[in-house]
Image (cartoon, helix red, strand yellow):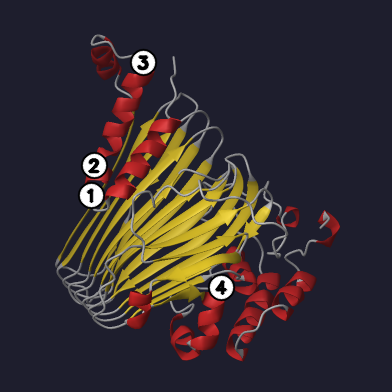
């Protein structure tokens, strides 16, 4: 297929995508409205508070094509890092928004667990999907969100019925080839009393690969449910990554969300956890590691909408070369969310003179009986620690690596999945280099 035949993110490409899929009328209408809204929107303005630290003037949508069918399937067995030694209950893999693998154990299927492509679920479980799809994701948030909604393809759907415990982790792999596009949407619904663990990896086939990801994640938890969700993003360093990710956590439910971002040329991700039921709890563990000229911007929100809830966000970032990270956090408390316990913190370790870290914590509290704290630190590697290590036979590179790993150790200690701890530690250690 030549480049002249590849569909664009325009009316022709939209018509080609919708003509090639079979889906309910309500979903087609939703796509159509999103496409019309996207065409009426401008790109985000740099002057707005959300985008003032993220420059997208070099981004050109015309350089990327809408999802197309694969001509050949690349080898991907060695790409994933979170599954080594893990007994999986099921897995879904997409390449350039095309589902290439979809498996679920017979035992889980017999319990009523649904783990399949979002497209299939929209047909076989139409009312269930219609109730929850885009119930937390706002297609009108910006033009990126509207385009994602219009061109969504290859998405994944997980449904865990009431009181079902999924012991084995489920794995989702989203892969981009060089020059490919990914518009997948992940929808996870955990019913009352149910439990599950999901490992989600975003990878390019090559660390230098270009591409475009317009993504969305919705995590919906009913009362007394428990979810561990791990997201590891290692797109190629010429890939643009735009995503809206949101969770709704019901009464007495708990969410542990681990997010690691080490890939892409530019990332702009909005992550929000809404605590909507009494005594809901969430713990979010964030790791960012940048190098070269990467720019990673993550905006987080912990939104307390019910009383007696607890949120705990900890993000740690390290920056090398001329890279930059932006973290902007907000604890928002509604008037009726009394007895809120909210905590957020962002720590940065700057590893070169040209690197930069922007950290902006914030509070918006409308209740009067709460405990909300936030903090931020930015520092360089302590030369005394390096000197101490070198006096004991370590090279500067070895000493720096130990200090960086130690910096992230607080995050690792919070992660309850051994394979995830090991994979993140190895990934960070590989990226640390020596500086004079």
User: Badges 1 and 2: C-beta atoms under 8 Å apart?
Assistant: yes
- Residue bearing mark 3: 396
- Residue 157 in the image: above or below residue 327: below
Q: Mark 4 or mark 3: which comes first in sequence? A: 4
Q: Mark 1 or mark 3: which comes first in sequence? A: 3
- Residue bearing mark 4: 140
- Residue bearing mark 2: 410
User: Badges 2 and 4: C-beta atoms under 8 Å apart?
Assistant: no
- Residue bearing mark 1: 414
Q: Mark 2 or mark 4: which comes first in sequence? A: 4
Which residue corresponds to the image point at 72% horizontal and 65% vertical from the top-left? 9
Crowding near pointer 2: few (<14 within 10 Å), some, many (20+)?
Answer: few
Which residue corresponds to the image point at 26% horizontal and 51% vertical from the top-left? 415
Q: Nearer the viewer, mark 2 or mark 4?
A: 2
Q: Is residue 294 visible?
A: yes
User: Badges 2 and 3: C-beta atoms under 8 Å apart?
Assistant: no
Q: Give how far apart the Cα atoms at labels 1 and 4 are.
A: 35 Å
Percent across and percent down for residue 187 are 45, 73
Q: Give how far apart the Cα atoms at labels 1 and 3 are.
A: 28 Å
């Amino acid at each position: 297929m030549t480049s002249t035949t590849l569909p664009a993110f325009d009316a022709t490409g939209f018509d080609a995508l919708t003509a090639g899929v079979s889906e309910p009328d309500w979903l087609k209408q939703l796509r159509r409205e999103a496409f019309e809204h996207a065409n009426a929107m401008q790109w985000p303005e740099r002057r707005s508070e959300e985008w003032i630290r993220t420059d997208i003037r070099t981004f050109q949508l015309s350089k990327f094509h809408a999802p197309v069918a694969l001509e050949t399937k690349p080898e991907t067995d060695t790409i994933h890092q979170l599954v080594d030694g893990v007994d999986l209950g099921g897995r879904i893999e997409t390449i350039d928004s095309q589902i290439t693998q979809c498996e679920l154990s017979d035992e889980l299927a017999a319990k009523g667990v649904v783990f399949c492509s979002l497209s299939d679920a929209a047909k076989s479980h139409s009312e269930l999907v219609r109730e929850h799809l885009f119930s937390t994701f706002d297609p009108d948030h910006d033009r990126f969100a509207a385009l994602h909604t219009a061109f969504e393809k290859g998405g994944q759907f997980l449904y865990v019925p009431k009181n079902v415990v999924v012991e084995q982790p489920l794995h989702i792999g989203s892969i981009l080839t060089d020059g490919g596009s990914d518009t997948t949407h992940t929808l996870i619904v955990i019913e009352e009393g149910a439990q599950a663990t999901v490992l989600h990896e975003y990878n390019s086939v090559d660390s230098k690969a270009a591409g475009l990801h317009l993504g969305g994640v919705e995590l919906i938890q009913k009362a007394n449910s428990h979810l561990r969700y791990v997201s590891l993003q290692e797109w190629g360093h010429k890939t643009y990554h735009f995503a809206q990710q949101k969770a709704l956590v019901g009464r007495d439910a708990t969410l542990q969300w681990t997010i690691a971002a080490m890939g892409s040329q530019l990332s702009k991700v909005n992550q929000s956890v809404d605590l909507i039921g009494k005594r809901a709890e969430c713990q979010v563990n964030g790791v960012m590691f940048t190098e070269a000229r990467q720019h990673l911007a993550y905006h987080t929100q912990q939104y307390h909408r019910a009383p007696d809830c607890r949120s705990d966000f900890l993000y740690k970032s390290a920056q090398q070369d001329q890279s930059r990270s932006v973290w902007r956090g907000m604890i928002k408390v509604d008037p009726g969310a009394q007895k809120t316990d909210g905590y957020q913190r962002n720590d940065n370790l700057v590893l070169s003179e040209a690197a930069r870290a922007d950290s902006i914590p914030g509070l918006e509290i409308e209740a009067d009986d709460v405990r909300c704290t936030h903090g931020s630190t930015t520092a360089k590697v302590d030369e005394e620690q390096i000197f101490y290590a070198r006096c004991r036979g370590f090279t500067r590179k070895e000493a720096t690596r130990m200090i960086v790993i130690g910096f992230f150790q607080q995050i690792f200690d919070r992660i309850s999945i051994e394979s995830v701890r090991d994979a993140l530690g190895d990934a960070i250690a590989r990226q640390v280099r020596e500086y004079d």
